[in-house]
Image (cartoon, grey):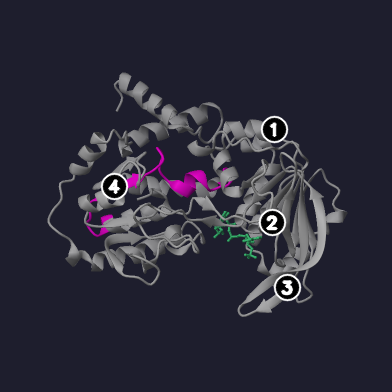
Amino acid sequence: MGAGPAGLYGADALLKRGAQVDVFEAQFAPFGLVRYGVAPDHQKIKKTQVVFEKILHRPHLRLFANVRIGTDVTVPQLLDHYDQILVTMGSSGARALQVPGESLPGSLSATEFVNWYNSHPDFVDLAPVLDHPVAVVVGMGNVAIDVARILLRDPEDLDKTDISPVAVRALEKSRVNQVVLLARRGPNQAAFDQKEVRELAALPGIEVGVAGYIPKRRTPMSEFIASFPRANQLGGKKRVILWFCASPVEILGQTRVEAIRIEKNHLVQSAARMRAVGTGEYTKLECGLVLRAIGYHGTPLPDVSFSQETGTIPNDEGRVLDAPHGQVVRGLYVAGWIKRGPTGLIGTNKSCAVETVARMEEDLDQVGPERDPDAIVRLLRQRGVRFITEQEWTVLDAHETREGAARGRVRDKLSSLEQALKVLELRGQMGVA
Ligand code: NAP
């Protein structure tokens, strides 16, 4: 359930054990975070899509895309049709800062912004405000670095990728020339990979500088951070500032974001974690856009238990539980971010899915009589669900790459179900499967 990395790695492991697998996906297109999360200028990572394409076209796998579980069909209905269900719906929500002003126009989650530039159908109309020279990104992980890079990178370069053309036009008109990343803790606690910052600093016309606290104790990370100039020494046109020990306490503005109030922190060792504690010293920074890149958060699936605290489905090595530390729910399993939380790289989902599939295999003695594979097709049709099959996805994929190539781009993504259905209808009229 969910045709992203965890779902397709899970499907692959199940197919290798001789299972028949149906993959359900809410969007009309598969590949989840690879399509809608990975930055468009990271085409090397996006190429993992080839691996997932292969899995998708294996015998004994059927794709049912454009099916929303919980509305088009429920989990109890699916449990009536399948021996085992693997939930791999990821973490599509974003954590909230819980500071005043967070809902002002111009304050967005990085997740929304990332989905927008990746042509996610639900975010096409996001229209982020890019009319102020300063944008603030809260968080110091890889997503924060991704959005800073996309905000400042030459739109002409981005246009060669599969980025949304709407985003390219908006970025061409953008006035943003300074992106300030706020880390509540110090350099030694930064969550990004150094190579991501090196890539950013190596881009033509972009300077990286640091502000706030730099620890005296030398570590590879603190030395890496100290190798950048202080922010006030930067003179270039486009600047990224990594500001440490700084927390947003309020987003200010009358009808939209106009500034952010920042509190300086100091670090306090508590148990295994270094904690940020406010010093009561505040600064105001004028800006027009605030992006929260403080982590993804799972959303609940109707009829399935959920921990609001962790944003995950309670589970024991992938077996779904009816509550945290509760009883195992027969036939229901989980893998990927919705199992373990929003961390790790694409490949991490492989071992995660394989662990769950091993539990599914152990439980095969609980499986009932043989099922009719056409029953689910009949149910979806009865309910008027226009699902997209793997053959139809092949048509859409070919259309996107062909249209992209014609414009010197990697791919021109279809950004709505209506567009996708139109392509399929035209191909049908031309008699092409
Ligand atoms: P992340 O790595 O968990 O980083 C989240 C950042 O937000 C941390 O700096 C964290 O600081 C901060 N934060 C959390 N709560 C906060 C709060 N209330 N106030 C202020 N700051 C707060 O999350 P992510 O960047 O969303 O990335 C998610 C996963 O995807 C990661 O595993 C990442 O490596 C991966 N990813 C990889 C790539 C790539 O390889 N190019 C690209 C994108 C994403 P604290 O440490 O203080 O909590």
In which image quadrant can residue 356 be found? bottom left
Q: Which mark is residue 302?
A: none
Nearer the N terminus, badge 4 or badge 2? 4
Question: Depth-wise, is mark 4 or mark 3 nearer the camera?
Answer: 3
Residues drawn in magenta? 15-42
Marks 3/1: CA–CA distance: 40 Å
- Which structural element holds mark 4? loop
Nearer the N terminus, badge 3 or badge 2? 2
- The residue carrying pointer 1 sits among few (fewer than 14), some (14 to 19) or many (20 or more) residues within 10 Å by Cα, namely few
Identify the residue at horizontal 67%, vertical 44% (top origin).
Answer: 104
Instruction: Check disc 2 and give the amino acid type.
Output: Arg
Question: Which residue carries the number 1 mark?
Answer: 172
- Which structural element holds mark 3? strand
Asked if 185 appears above or below 150 in the picture, the reply is below
Q: Position of residue 330 (x, y in %)?
A: 25, 63
Query: Where ligand 1 lies, by image quadrant?
Result: bottom right
